[in-house]
Amino acid sequence: MSEQDNCIFCKIVRGEIPAKKVFEDDDVLAFLDIKPVAPIHVLVIPKKHIASLAQVSETDAPLLGKILALVPTLATAQGADDGFRVIVNAGRIGQQEVQHLHIHIVSGPQPLGPMLAR
Ligand code: 5GP
Ligand code: ZN
């Protein structure tokens, strides 16, 4: 059994579990976070299973660039026309919960507060 078989985001890519998709092409999928931390909370993932930002290499650069370049369009489409925050949790210290690389786009009508709780 491979890592992809049990990966929850791979299951979303394969259509095995539902998600509220907001963008899809051959390489990238974006969907609403199931437990939003702000009024706008979108996850953007590569369809290909990459476990973590902590495990990417230079060969992943075009895909990562593509994902990041999609952010403003996705954010605006969700109504974040006055700014947003992008978060990538990685590894144990970053408290990454789902081991399939994803970026969070969060925004809302109100400013989001400090980057980390202090
Ligand atoms: P992490 O802590 O790994 O950066 O964030 C994982 C995110 O995935 C969390 O914000 C969590 O709410 C979201 N998430 C976990 N399982 C699911 C799911 O089955 N569907 C959706 N849409 N989001 C999920
Ligand atoms: Zn996966």
Image: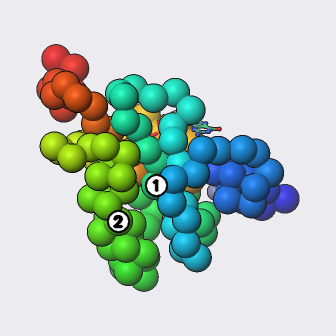
Q: Residue at x 51, y 60 (%)?
A: 23
Q: Residue at x 43, y 44 (%)?
A: 42
Badge 1 marks a residue whose secondary structure is strand
Outermost residue toward the top in this view: 118
Find residue 95 and report its image quarter: top left
The one of 108 and 95 positioned closer to us in this rendering: 108
The one of 7 and 13 positioned closer to us in this rendering: 13
* Circle 2/circle 1 CB separation < 8 Å: yes
Residue 3 at what x, y percent from top left?
A: 72, 57
Residue 44, numbered circle = 1
Is 30 placed left or right of 17 in the picture? left
Taking 47 as reference, is 83 above or below it? above
Q: Quadrant of ligand 1?
A: top right
Residue 74 at what x, y percent from top left?
A: 37, 56
Disc 2 within 8 angstroms of ligand 1 (CB): no
Given the image, on which type of amino acid does mark 2 rest? Leu
The one of 112 and 89 positioned closer to us in this rendering: 112
Taking 57 as reference, is 113 above or below it? above
Residue 70, numbered circle = 2
Residue 110 at what x, y percent from top left?
A: 19, 25
Given the image, on which type of amino acid does mark 1 rest? Val
Badge 2 marks a residue whose secondary structure is helix
Find residue 50 and report its image quarter: bottom right
Other residues around mark 2 within 10 Å, as few (<14) / some (14–19) / many (≥20): some
Is 6 placed left or right of 62 in the picture? right
The one of 74 and 86 positioned closer to us in this rendering: 74
Disc 1 within 8 angstroms of ligand 1 (CB): no
Q: Residue at x 32, y 38 (%)?
A: 106
